[in-house]
Image: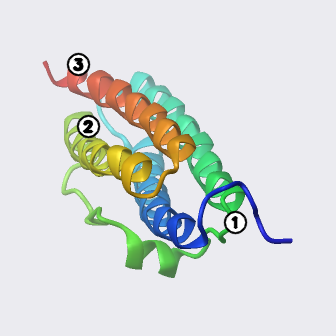
């Protein structure tokens, strides 16, 4: 059945396109955080292993909520690695060292890129596409990423 929430189809399509890019970015950073969790080495192994686990669990929830937001506005979420790699803004590069500082710097850079992408869409979703719900929703996501970035950054000081 067609979604009828008072938003024009052309607007929900434009919003869904951007949400699909965000979903891809989230899936890539989730995978990179899993990699850090699995492959961390060093004297701080246990603490960082647990820390990265908490981060990927939070990202897993974000991924699910974005896909559900895409569906709730009447569109389909991408769900293959091929689609995610085509849509993402992030790099899938492998870092040279498996120490916490290297993983943290790489993940911090990705979180900051996601924050910028979200920030660029907040007003557009509200003003251009009249989707205040999604604008509000991604504002909350931005705040979650800002907190994750802050916590990652704190490890580097």
- Circles 3 and 2: CB atoms closer than 8 Å: no
Task: Residue under label 1, please give it.
Answer: 74
Q: Nearer the viewer, residue 145 or 14?
A: 14
Q: Tell me the SS state at disc 1.
A: loop
Q: Is residue 92 above or below residue 65?
A: below
Q: CA distance from mark 1 to mark 2?
A: 36 Å
Task: Residue under label 3, please give it.
Answer: 154
**Circle nearer the viewer, 3 or 1:** 1
As drawn, the label of residue 87 is none
Q: Is residue 114 above or below residue 137?
A: below
Left or right: 75, with 113 as reference point: right
User: In which quarter of the view is residue 6 placed?
Assistant: bottom right
Left or right: 69, with 119 as reference point: right
Q: Nearer the viewer, residue 20 or 82?
A: 20
Q: Earlier in the sequence, mark 1 or mark 2?
A: 1
Q: Nearer the viewer, residue 21 or 11?
A: 11
Left or right: 78, with 87 as reference point: right
Residue 113 appears in view: yes
Residue at point 63%, 46% (across, down)? 65
Residue 78 appears in view: no
Task: Residue under label 2, please give it.
Answer: 104
Q: Position of residue 80 (x, y in %)?
A: 58, 76
Would you call the spot at circle 1 few (<14 residues within 10 Å), some (14-19), or many (20 or more)?
Answer: some
Quadrant where the image shows the C terminus: top left
Q: Position of residue 150 (x, y in %)?
A: 27, 23
Q: Tell me the SS state at disc 2.
A: helix
User: In which quarter of the view is residue 70 placed?
Assistant: bottom right
Q: CA distance from mark 3 to mark 1?
A: 40 Å
Quadrant where the image shows the N terminus: bottom right
Q: Earlier in the sequence, mark 3 or mark 1?
A: 1
Would you call the spot at circle 3 few (<14 residues within 10 Å), some (14-19), or many (20 or more)?
Answer: few
Q: Earlier in the sequence, mark 3 or mark 2?
A: 2
């Amino acid at each position: 059945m067609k979604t009828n929430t008072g938003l024009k189809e052309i607007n929900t399509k434009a919003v869904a396109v951007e949400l699909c890019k965000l979903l891809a970015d989230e899936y890539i950073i989730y995978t990179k955080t899993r990699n850090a969790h699995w492959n961390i080495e060093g004297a701080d192994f246990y603490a960082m292993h647990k820390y990265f686990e908490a981060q990927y669990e939070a990202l897993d929830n974000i991924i699910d909520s974005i896909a559900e937001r895409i569906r709730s506005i009447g569109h389909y979420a991408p769900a293959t690695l091929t689609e995610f790699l085509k849509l993402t803004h992030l790099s899938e590069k492998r870092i040279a060292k498996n120490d916490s500082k290297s993983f943290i710097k790489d993940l911090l850079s990705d979180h900051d890129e996601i924050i910028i992408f979200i920030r660029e869409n907040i007003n557009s979703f509200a003003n251009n596409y009249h989707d205040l719900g999604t604008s509000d929703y991604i504002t909350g996501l931005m705040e979650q990423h800002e907190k994750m970035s802050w916590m990652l950054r704190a490890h580097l000081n």
